[in-house]
Image (cartoon, grey):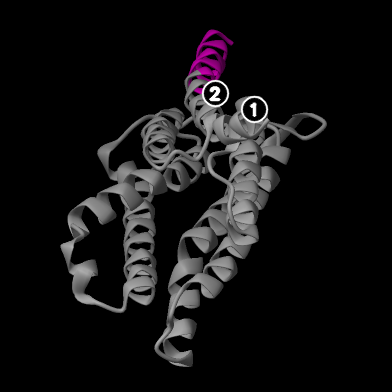
Amino acid sequence: MDGLSENLFGTLGSFALIASIALRILSALLLCGALIFLNRRQEAGWWMAVASYASTIPSVFLQLGTGRWSGPLTVIVFLIISVIPAALGIAAGLYGRACFQKSALASSGTRNIRLRRFHPVHLVAPIGVAAVYGVGSMASLFIYISALTQSGVVQSFSFGVLFATGFLTGLAVGGLVALAHGSRWGWFLFVPAALVSLLGTAASAQGSVLIFLYLTQAVLAMFGCVAWGRLSKQKSNA
């Protein structure tokens, strides 16, 4: 039984670790639901995206009990920086819902969105959001590792790798911003974000459930791109 549990969820030790993995599974599951609803252009998808990123916030507080913090100021700075990625995801979800509400209703909760043709300038906002996400993720991880070690070992970490990982993960938030603007290519941004999360989960042996959910996100993103492509063809034939 223990072997099955470890295969599904990874090594479960302390309560904080169990709760952290449970919150990650919940967040990934909610984002899968968000992609399904956004595929159908339904507003519920934006609320699920908001819930997905909001569910990651308690994990920040769970980390406080595992570090050796130098003082209250360090804790406050850590909390503020660590919440930045979640805040960006929540803001992107609320922004997307506001943008969708400007489109006419096709049916209950479904919007007749107008797709926007690709232009390089449209990449600025999604990439910018992902970059801020990457900086916040990198900084929070740096502070957390410093609190764990209280030594110079943190200097051995590559800031480039930490930022790149955070940036690629943040492309999911950038994808939400792109979808809010009616950009079909925004679906592609969820794929590298999901794959990076999948690889990180596999490397840290956190179980097959999360791996499956991240793989599902990548597949759902491809389906979403196809579905919005059909919408574009329908409008061109009308």
Q: Position of residue 21 (x, y in %)?
A: 59, 48
First to last magenta residue range: 223-238
For disc 2, the neighbor class at 10 Å (few under 14, some 14 to 19, many from 20) is many
Q: Position of residue 157 (x, y in %)?
A: 21, 60
Q: Farthest residue toward the right? A: 108
Name the residue that disc number 2 marks: 220
Residue drawn at x 65%, y 59% is 15
In the image: residue 154, left or right of residue 109: left
Q: Where is residue 27 in the image (x, y as percent from the top left)?
A: 61, 46
Is residue 37 positioned above or below 12 on the image? above
Inspect this view and state whether residue 102 appears. no
Q: Position of residue 16 (x, y in %)?
A: 61, 61
Q: Farthest residue toward the top? A: 237
In the image: residue 11, left or right of residue 163: right
The N terminus lies in which quarter of the figure?
top right
Give the structural element (helix, strand or loop) at label 1.
helix
Q: Nearer the viewer, residue 48 or 64?
A: 64
